[in-house]
Image (cartoon, rainbow, N blue to C red):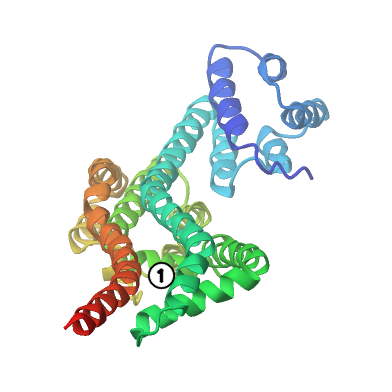
Amino acid sequence: MFYAIGLSKERDYFVENLSMLISSGMPITNALDSISAELRTKRMKKVISDMKIDLDSGVALWKTLSNTSLFPEHSISLIRLGEESSNLINNLKVVAVEQAKNRVFKSKLRSAMMYPAFVLVLTFIVGLGIAWFILPKLATVFSQLKITLPLITKILISAGVFLGNYGKFVVPLAIILVIALFFFIFILPKTRFIGQWILFLIPGIRDLIKEVEVARLGYLLGTLLQAGVQITHAFDSLASATEISLYKKLYKHMSVSIEDGSSVQKSLASFKYTNRLIPSPVQQLISTGEQSGTLSESLLGIGQTFEAKADASTKNLTTILEPILLVIVWLGVVAVALAVILPIYSLVGKFNAGSR
């Protein structure tokens, strides 16, 4: 089995063009040749070559795509359903649109995090430069003054002396530790729930995550149900599509609860954190749609509404986070300024007293 890691752009290009070429009446193998000719990635060309071998051997398209590990489970389910119901072209188009939407949802979260991350990294670099190159010189000056130094200045001097002596070892180690901590909190699959919990505490980011995930819920679940996928499989697909641990737990709970015979409304109500993750009006809309038999239409409407809200929140997030970031930077500047200015005031006061 070929694990196509890092081929997300090529995968999206592949499925978009495959659906377009097949809908024009081109045979699948010819469509694969046409797509392969436009690709530059050798790994993706190898994936398509392996697919052609499987197809020539009589393997179904959905099974061939499953062997590539290019697509998530819910996309494979859609393609399989399309093949079995002679609706492959439409379902491929659904997969292409779904992949594009998923890419948009992820980019909203990433773009929203770029500004605060940039400011914090820049602040860290500037602070590190001051601590490493300026503090040792200030420490030398202040240590020669025969005055009682404030506590904050003593801390500054101690830090300056320490960095002056051990900076070439401590600074690289600190950078490595920060990178390792970031990886542990936000990237490592088993522990990134910690980073997600932290993000849920930040105003603006919490609301944006909720809007993006509700938009994903509405659009993806509605699309899968409209395409004929069983609702339990659709929730399993949602669980595999999201990266937020709490939402993943919610969708897995929904799948198990519905399979046990509960309605969507009761399954939502029985999950501990539903009200924190899904707004009450959305829960009511889902319940009404389930009772009236228009659940997929209601979900698609929810997806459109919350995608528009996520767009607005992404644009406004900078305005929301800017005061918080300014306070963080301001505290650092004030601390250094006080550590430098207070001894000077003490020294001036001592000179004035001596002149009298």
Q: Residue 8 at x, y = what percent?
A: 59, 37
Q: Which residue occupies the foreground of this view, 218 or 344?
A: 344
Quarter that holds the C terminus: bottom left
Q: Residue 208 at x, y = what percent?
A: 30, 53
Q: What is the tally of numbered marks visible in this picture?
A: 1
Residue 120 appears anywhere in the view: yes
Residue 294 placement, left or right of 133 = left
Q: Would you place residue 216 above or below residue 163 in this image? A: above
Quarter that holds the N terminus: top right
Q: Residue 192 at x, y = what percent?
A: 52, 66
Q: Secondary structure at mark 1?
A: helix
Q: Would you place residue 336 above or below residue 111 in this image? A: below
Q: Which residue occupies the foreground of this view, 64 or 43?
A: 43
What residue is drawn where x is 56% and y is 60%? 187
Q: What amino acid is labelled 1 in the image?
A: Trp
Residue pointed to by mark 1: 197
Residue 173 lies in quadrant:
bottom right
Q: Residue 265 at x, y = what percent?
A: 28, 66
Residue 179 lies in quadrant:
bottom right
